[in-house]
Amino acid sequence: MYYYLKGRVTMINNGLVILEVGGIGYAINVLHEEHYKIGDEVMIFVNHIVREDEEYFVGFETLQEKEVYNLLLTVKGIGPKMALNALKSISIERFLDIVKRGDLIALKKLPGIGPKAASQIILDLKGTLMMQPEKKTTLNANKELAKDALINLGFKPRDLDEALKNLEEDLSVKEYISKALKQMRK
């Protein structure tokens, strides 16, 4: 399973970013192509969508975008392309606010979302979102990746949250891992 791709942007066209990773160009459907520039080195969180007749990547700048997209996919009747098109036209924070408020009119204004889909989104997601703690709007990707790596090695998320919470915000994944391990040894 793919989690993210890190490489150089070589082309941008109609909602697609072509990301060169190790000599291979990956076409990634992104929410906001205008946030990318040709030649930039970027990391894009991805979902690999495989259907009977097609296969493609959907990419996100932040883990929060990816989480909201995946939440939207849990809604009955919402597929990968409908979710992508709906989220392209709105900020993640605004989308979450609309769902929490149960604003059917605002949801129906999103591309591909009609009255039935809007009602289903609110029905399926409002309770889930109300129960989730508020997250910062900007997540530190390197810190999240370090936490995921340490969880995969068997460390408890609660211990990692404590070890990572007071660290600087501009470290590499390797530095976060190293400093978190030192904190947990204390």
Image: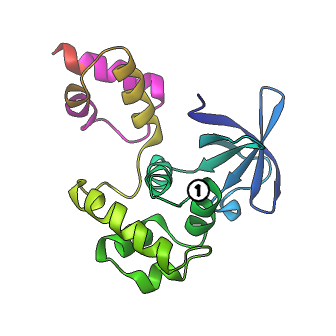
Quarter of the picture holding the C terminus: top left
Which residue is located at x 58 percent, y 50 percent?
60
Q: Residue at x 66, y 55 (%)?
A: 30
Looking at the picture, tell me which residue is in the foreground, 17 or 146.
17
Image: magenta residue range: 161-182
Q: Quadrant of residue 8?
A: top right
Taking 164 as reference, is 71 left or right?
Answer: right
Query: Can you give x and y, in whole percent of width and height, for residue 112 in the image?
Result: 61, 73
Magenta span: helix, strand or loop, mainly? Answer: helix
**Could you tell me which secondary element the residue under label 1 belongs to?**
loop
Q: Residue furthest bottom?
A: 105
Q: Is residue 179 magenta?
A: yes
Q: Residue visible at 59% across and 73% down?
A: 89
Q: Residue at x 46, y 28 (%)?
A: 173
Q: Quadrant of the N terminus?
A: top right
Q: Is residue 56 left or right of residue 116?
A: right
Give the side of residue 156 with respect to residue 61, left or right: left
Q: Nearer the viewer, residue 5 or 127?
A: 127
Q: Position of residue 39 (x, y in %)?
A: 79, 47
Quadrant in which residue 155 is drawn: top left
Query: Which amino acid is tagged 1?
Result: Gly
Q: Is residue 53 magenta?
A: no
**Residue 162 left/right relative to 33:** left
The part of the image, by quadrant, that contains residue 51 is top right
65 in relation to 163, above or below: below
Identify the residue under disc 1.
79
